Image: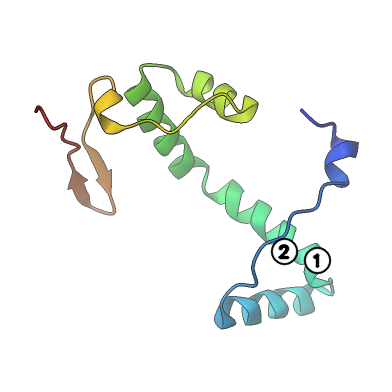
Amino acid sequence: MATRKEERGIRITIAVPGEYYWAMLNLEAWLKGRPIATEAPNLLGSILRNRTEERNNMLDFLAKGRGISREELIHKILSGTVQPQKLEDWVNPQPIYSEGLLIVPSINQS
């Protein structure tokens, strides 16, 4: 993994968001007296911090399907050793709840 100093030198490029979000980003930057290049990563960090519970639920679900712990899945993701998995390869698929809807994964038994 890169050190913090090395990470500071890494730059990512993203597409300009839609008109509404571009306007909101400009407003946020202006209100805080920051350039957009400074405000954008701050907003991204804030959003990621606020999604911790949702992200952990998703990681738990995916780890359970692989028969491993969340911590092991996180390690594999961060080390680049995990691959997307087909539903039929899952260990004991479980129902998921998403925005009030019950989604039951099914495996075709051909």
Reading the image, the residue beneath label 2 is 40
Which label is found at residue 71?
none
Point 76% across, 78% down: residue = 31
Does the CB distance between marks 2 and 1 fall below 8 Å? yes
Decide: is 45 above or below 90: below
Rendered image quadrant of residue 21: bottom right
Q: Secondary structure at mark 1?
A: helix
Point 13% across, 32% down: residue = 108
Point 20% across, 44% down: residue = 103
Residue 25 at what x, y percent from top left? 67, 74
Kind of residue sitting beneath label 2: Ala
In the image, is 87 to the left or to the right of 18? left
Quarter of the N terminus within the rendering:
top right
In three-dimensional space, the C-alpha distance between marks 2 and 1, rounded to whole angstroms, equals 6 Å
Residue 66 at what x, y percent from top left? 37, 21
Reading the image, the residue beneath label 1 is 37
